[in-house]
Amino acid sequence: MKNNAVKSIVAIGIGAALFFVCGRFIAIPCPIPNVTINIQYGVLAFMSAAFGPIVGLLIGLIGHALIDFSWGWGVWWSWVFSSAIFGFVMGCTKKLYGLNDGEFGTKQIVRFNVSQLIGHIIAWGIAAPALDILIYAEPASKVFLQGIVAGVSNIVTTAIVGTILCVAYAAARPKKGSLKEE
């Protein structure tokens, strides 16, 4: 149990740092105000799939808060919470694709991408716009457009980056039942 806690803490630190670096320095401009195309959600989906919902939630929360804080305009909590929600959803669905079993074939790739699609819809199609309206009294038409554009771009980048990370990780792990005692 103690070993899992240490792994989780290390995963949170590394994951939040990677999320921050990718989100802060590899953000591709988008024509919609305050929206960028990001690859950090592929990293978040992978880390959540490998380490579970609490790790995913904390990586999304800490990593996104650090990105917002580093820009100097303050933390936009509705989107920070939405990143945390996405990480949590991906961690909750990790058993559907068994990343830690050492196999990540077509069936697991489809399950992973259906999960990330649902996670992004919840985070960017529902949570972010609703929290923008509740917390910041933003106009609904503006925040739903931002959420949809961010969600669609995140779905695409997660499908590419997240899938590549998962396939590489699974390939590097021993297959379930492949180790034999001599």
Image (tube, rainbow, N blue to C red):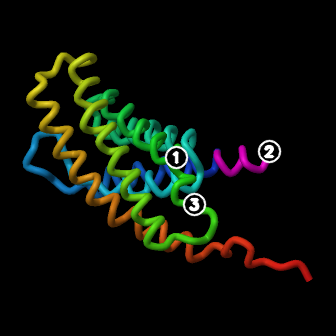
Mark number displayed over residue 165: none
- Identify the secondary structure beneath mark 3: loop
Mark number displayed over residue 98: 3
Closer to the eye: label 3 or 1 = 3
Answer left or right for 140 relative to 47. left
- Read off the residue under disc 2: 2
172 relative to 136, above or below: below
- Identify the secondary structure beneath mark 1: helix
Amino acid type shown at disc 2: Lys
Q: Quadrant of the N terminus?
A: top right
Q: Position of residue 77 (x, y in %)?
A: 34, 27
Q: Earlier in the sequence, mark 3 or mark 1?
A: 1
Answer left or right for 39 relative to 106. left
Residue at x 40%, y 42% (from the top left corner): 86
Closer to the eye: label 2 or 3 = 3
Q: Quadrant of the C terminus?
A: bottom right
Amino acid type shown at disc 3: Gly
Magenta-tinted stretch = 1-8
Residue at x 32%, y 45% (from the top left corner): 120
Residue at x 73%, y 78% (from the top left corner): 178
Q: In this rendered view, identify the residue nearer to me: 21 or 182.
A: 182
- Read off the residue under disc 1: 91
Asked whether 2 falls inside the magenta stretch, the response is yes
Closer to the eye: label 2 or 1 = 1
Q: How many marks?
A: 3
